[in-house]
Amino acid sequence: MRLSAYFLPTLKETPAEAQIVSHRLMLRAGMVRQSSAGIYSWLPLGFRVLKNIERIVREEQDAAGCQEILMPTIQPADLWRESGRYDDYGPEMLRITDRHERDMLYGPTNEEQITDIFRHSVKSYRELPKLLYHIQWKFRDEVRPRFGVMRGREFLMKDSYSFDVDKPSAMRAYNKMFIAYLRTFKRMGLKVIPMRAESGPIGGDTSHEFLILADTGESEVACHRDFIDADLVASDIDYEGDLQHLVDGFTDKYAATDDERDPSKEKELGDALVIARGIEVGHIFYFGTKYSKSMGAVVAGPDGEDTALEMGSYGIGVSRLVGAVIEASHDDAGIIWPESVAPFKVGLLNLKTDDNGCVAACDGIYAKLRSAGVEVLYDDRPERAGVKFADMDLIGLPWQLVVGPRGLKSGTVEVKERKTGERPEMPLETALAQLTA
Ligand code: ATP
Ligand code: MG
């Protein structure tokens, strides 16, 4: 993409309304624009990151055997009356009346809806287990929408739902999601800590939140220092194998969200206790038969008797993650995207657009990189070098390929790695080989 043609409305000034760094940088880098409180439009640069995050989430859900569907945003209130949550949910739910005076709502989550689909379609335990997910916009009329996309009112969530005939089978689904989550966040360059959590309005008895630690996190959490020092890796997973020992290994040490903290355990930990602030990027629940019983979702069990489905639900804050990745990876100059989610891999900077040699060289490099399948943002604008450097640092692409007349005389360019700030000069061919590898 040529920057001269790209819609990238960057801001010079720091927007006064943005209190945390990710919100400031997302506005300054022209990624999003607020429409009304907690509701955002995604502009091209931000949208590319959102899509990359969504893609990683999808790939890891698919790998874990979860099947993608798409449920609507608008749901009938009657389903929520059946589960009893229509009244329980309170003012966070956006309630809508259609022209026939029917009560509808903009879904804050989809347990009722998927349970309804399931009860009409699945009749026997032989059709179980099943794991389904969708990636869809949610609406929660948060009291205090803030921090940009981190606590929005409209936000994109991946939510999965598991259906099993008994608890041991439901726990296998829970464990699959647990491991899939570790893999998902790791691919985004995030260090997450799975913590024991309360299950809140969704209800149930086994629940973990996945948090990244950041000073700007909204909740206070506590964990064993080992979580900070160690890297939780879950590679080469056989999702059909027994994952319990793996999950146990990731959860045997103390880690708890604010409402699950245990003063006596924390005292025992002594120096190994870390108290920090965290951003919740994912949350998994096992809630048994809470919805299947109230909504009559039963299957014929092995003995022929009606058995209420054992269920769980598993959320990831896809749009929140865009902010969370920035909270975890930035410096004074701007964003530092991990390559896996970066909107483009390479920024190509032509330092002298009124020099025919520079233009020809840059056009050639641009064509080569693109034909090698590399995503490039080509700064071909007639701007000063200083402006170009500042904009590139702000939008945080992992690599900057800097082309100027002086280097070209000897056939060299500069390749700056955004993360380290290192900017070695090298022959053009070497640079191309490195960036297309
Ligand atoms: P929180 O405690 O932050 O309000 P929650 O526990 O109500 O979140 P869940 O129902 O667990 O949220 O939703 C699953 C995921 O969706 C969360 O882990 C979070 O990443 C994301 N999420 C929830 N609320 C919002 C929001 N208002 N804006 C952006 N993302 C959100
Ligand atoms: Mg939660």
Image (cartoon, grey):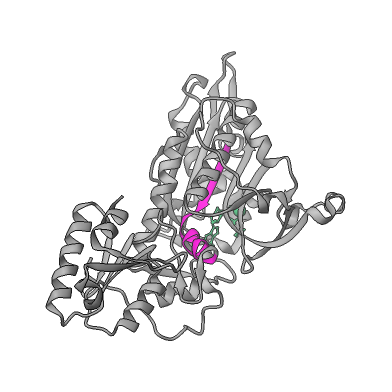
Expressed as whole percent of the image width and height from the top left, the position of residue 169 reads 59, 26
Number of labelled discs?
A: 0
> Up-down: is 260 above or below 361?
above
> Up-down: is 57 above or below 49?
above
Expressed as whole percent of the image width and height from the top left, the position of residue 312 reads 58, 38
Residue 68 visible in the current orientation = yes
The verdict on residue 94 being magenta is no
Residue 203 visible in the current orientation = no
Q: Is residue 202 left or right of residue 97?
A: right
Report the quarter where the N terminus lies.
bottom left
> Up-down: is 9 above or below 184?
below
Residue visible at 83% across and 51% down?
269
In front here: 116 or 274?
A: 274
Q: Is residue 402 left or right of residue 59?
A: left
Magenta segment boundaries in residue numbering: 311-327
Residue visible at 52% across and 37% down?
235
Image quadrant in which you'd find residue 335:
bottom left
In front here: 325 or 338?
A: 338
Expressed as whole percent of the image width and height from the top left, the position of residue 126 reads 49, 19
> Up-down: is 313 above or below 297?
below
In front here: 399 or 85?
A: 399
Q: Is residue 72 left or right of residue 221?
A: left
Expressed as whole percent of the image width and height from the top left, the position of residue 193 reads 63, 50
Residue visible at 24% across and 62% down?
428
Residue visible at 64% across and 30% down?
244
Q: Residue furthest front?
A: 410
The verdict on residue 316 being magenta is yes
